[in-house]
Image (cartoon, rainbow, N blue to C red):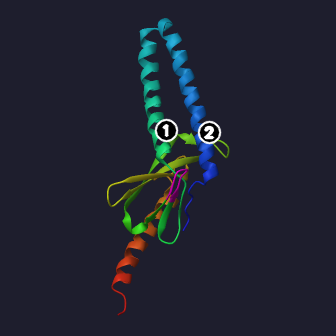
Amino acid sequence: MDTRFLTFMEFQSVYFYRFITLAIFVASGVLLLFALPGMKRAEMWVIVPVLLILWGRFAVEYFRVKKSGPAFLHDDELVISGVESRRQIPLTRIRSVSSRHSVFMVRRYRSWTDHLAFLQVTLTNGERIYTLVESKVFEFPAGKGTLRAMQAAVLSAKTKTPAREHGPE
């Protein structure tokens, strides 16, 4: 299976670029505050909503990255390793896997066409776990290779489980 999860070192790079993007947004906000008194009303009606939409999207991605951790598949388990803990989640406990494109969390150190996607794993108890995977800019769904591999692994694990329970006696 072709799973392209981000490694711990690549996560550190994402955290760095997330900080740089936050600094750029803070600077643009400060500059906007100084420029607002001299702007015409028509200019404000264009610039302010666009910046608010961008800031909102960045806030969503900021908190998704905060919840994310490096992951990999090992022996019918999804292993999420973080700074504080390491979780091993049996693939049979996964209800669904979906992915979403990332707008601001790009991998600038590689190529402008290499972006990231948020892989959302929903467990049977409703808990959502996020990780980051490699994706292309216009790939649909985001990170489709890893998404398909995860869905196939979950399906395979779920079909193996009944066979083990009702095996030869």
Name the spot of residue 76 as percent of width and height, x first: 47, 71
- Per the image, the residue denoted by label 1 is 62
Q: Would residue 36 appear left or right of 166 to someone viewing this image?
A: right
- Where, quadrant-wise, is the C terminus in this rendering? bottom left
Q: Which mark is residue 46?
A: none
Name the spot of residue 42 as percent of width and height, x first: 42, 12
Name the spot of residue 23 as percent of width and height, x first: 58, 28
As helix, strand or loop, the secondary structure at mark 1 comes to: helix
- Per the image, the residue denoted by label 2 is 16
Work out whether mark 1 precedes mark 2 in sequence or the reverse, and give the earlier one: 2
Looking at the picture, which amino acid does disc 2 mark? Phe
Please tell me which residue lies in front, 6 or 78: 78
**Which residue sits at x=43%, y=26%?**
52
Residue 46 sits in which quadrant? top left
Which residue reaches farthest right?
109
Looking at the picture, which amino acid does disc 1 mark? Tyr
Q: Would residue 124 appear left or right of 70 to someone viewing this image?
A: left
Query: Could one spot residue 107 in this view of the protein?
Result: no
